[in-house]
Amino acid sequence: MAKNLLQQYFPMLWVREELEERIRKDSVLFSIFQSWKPEQRDEFLDFCTGERGVKILYDCFFKEVFNPEYTPERLEKLVSLIMKQKVRILQVLPNDSVRIADEASLLITDIVVELEDHSIANVEVQKIGYMFPGQRSACYSADLLLRQYKRIRGRKKENFSYKDIQNVYTIVFFEQSTVEFHKFPKDILHCFEQKSDTGLKLNLLQKYYFVPLDIFLKNLQNKGIKTELDAWLVFLTCDEPERIAELIQAYPEFKRTYEDIYELCRNMEDVMGLFSKELQELDRNTVQYMIDVMQDEIDASKKLITEQEQQLNEQAKQLSEKDQQLSEKEQQLKQQELDNQLYALLDQDERLTDLRRAIKDEAFRKQLLEEYQLK
């Protein structure tokens, strides 16, 4: 059987028939394999045989490739390109277990390292970007800063000085970025730090780097691999054999990294265990994400209903005030009408009195005239 494209670069890759036979002969492996959905079985067979590349952003593969204890140079290189300065990893720091428990629904991986200058970098990959990425990142950057402060304060005690507190870097890769990033469709790296509006310079320690990988992939279709950072992002995101071959030809050093991954894939027990765990996590993440979205929709609906109730109450209040005003106006009009009627009656009475007086006077004159004529 002719070798596929990736098998030409990596001869250790399984031949599909051999791999399927290997799985069938082992009852434990076959049971695991059968527990997967058909599309998941195909995905596993594809990346083990080179029909497709490995999804590096899967937690098990990402941590294998970028393990700062075994191969620190890889994470150092990636972080150096993101931060645009050379860095060296001094040690790996423990994650915040509370945070991981709270946010496991969308967080693929999370690595915290101390750099050579004792600054701290938190590198994380998010499958789907959290809502409010700025606020969230600021909170966890502040948490990193506080953890550093407590560690140094506890170690130095009376000799503590704030000059010992170094920068904290938050580096986030989004597999699916949030809507804010899509307003900048040409930008694949966003750097943030606090600055003064007067030009005064103070080191406020917190730096942020955001990489929307979905936007990078859209741009990649048009421009191809142009820079070393492009190469690393292709490595993270692309599983097309043609793109992987293009990457290896442009940057041969990636061939060794892929070889490490495919050597792992030769060990069926380990790689199937890792893949099963990955699938379980993805399923759980999908369910949790749907719950999160539904909860957001429910919260938004509740907020809308509350606002509508407030508007209705305000409208009812305004209508009540208008009714009161109309009632008062009606009373005023009725009173005015009664007053007018009274004035009309008084006027008529006065006119009648004058008429009676005039008639009386006329009769008196007529009587006098008659008396005069008789004489």
Image: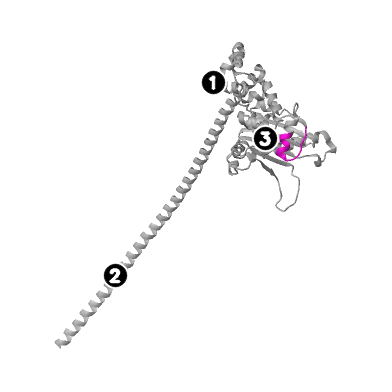
* Residue designated by label 3: 231
Disc on res. 349: 2
Compared with residue 102, is residue 320 higher up or lower down, i.e. above or below? Answer: below
Label 1 sits on what residue type? Pro
Quarter holding the C terminus is bottom left
The label nearer to you, 1 versus 3, is 3
Residue 90 within the magenta-colored segment of the rendering: no
Residue farthest to the right, as pictured: 159
Element at label 3: helix
> Reading the chain from its start, which is encountered first: label 1 or label 3?
1
Q: Which residues are magenta?
A: 77-89
The label nearer to you, 1 versus 2, is 1
Label 2 sits on what residue type? Asp
Number of numbered callouts drawn = 3
State the residue in front, 37 or 12.
12
> Reading the chain from its start, which is encountered first: label 1 or label 2?
1
Please give left or right for residue 294 compared with residue 248 in the image. Answer: left
